[in-house]
Image (cartoon, helix red, strand yellow):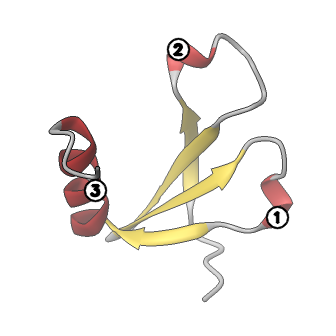
Amino acid sequence: MIRDDIGRWRKSSRSAGANSCVEVGQAPGVLGIRDTKNRAGGTLVVSRVAFGAFLGAVKSDRLG
């Protein structure tokens, strides 16, 4: 699915201006995730709920 409405892209402030990280954009009900080195290479689109669950798993070290 192609989403042209994803905007407000941002990347971590900890990236220190480096161009080797991912950035997250917002659209109603979903988030887009893309590589800053290849923005035209595609966007992973996930629901806000799924992204929240993923972040929770990362923060609690449940991904093994």
Q: Quadrant of residue 8?
A: top right
Q: Horizontal placement of 19 versus 50: left or right?
A: right
How crowded pointer 1 is (Cα within 10 Å; few <14, some 14-19, many 20+) is rated as few
The residue nearer to you, when weighing 25 against 60, is 60
Residue sitting at the far top: 16
Residue 12 position within the rendered picture, expressed as x and y whole percent measured from the top left: 51, 26
The residue that disc 2 covers is 14
Q: Amino acid at mark 3?
A: Phe
Check disc 1 and report its element: helix, strand or loop.
helix
Q: Are marks 3 and 1 in contact (CB under 8 Å)?
A: no
> How many dots with numbers?
3
How crowded pointer 3 is (Cα within 10 Å; few <14, some 14-19, many 20+) is rated as few
Tell me the quadrant of the picture where the N terminus can be found.
Answer: bottom right
Q: Amino acid at mark 2?
A: Arg
Check disc 2 and report its element: helix, strand or loop.
helix
Q: Are marks 2 and 1 in contact (CB under 8 Å)?
A: no
Check disc 3 and report its element: helix, strand or loop.
helix
Give me the C-alpha separation between circle 3 and circle 2: 20 Å
Nearer-N-terminus badge (3/2): 2
Residue 33 position within the rendered picture, expressed as x and y whole percent measured from the top left: 56, 56
Nearer-N-terminus badge (2/1): 2
The residue that disc 1 covers is 41
Residue 49 position within the rendered picture, expressed as x and y whole percent measured from the top left: 21, 66
Q: Horizontal placement of 57 versus 32: left or right?
A: left
Q: Amino acid at mark 1?
A: Gly
Q: Quadrant of residue 51?
A: bottom left
* Residue plotted at (62% across, 42% down): 22
Residue 54 bears which disc, if any?
Answer: 3
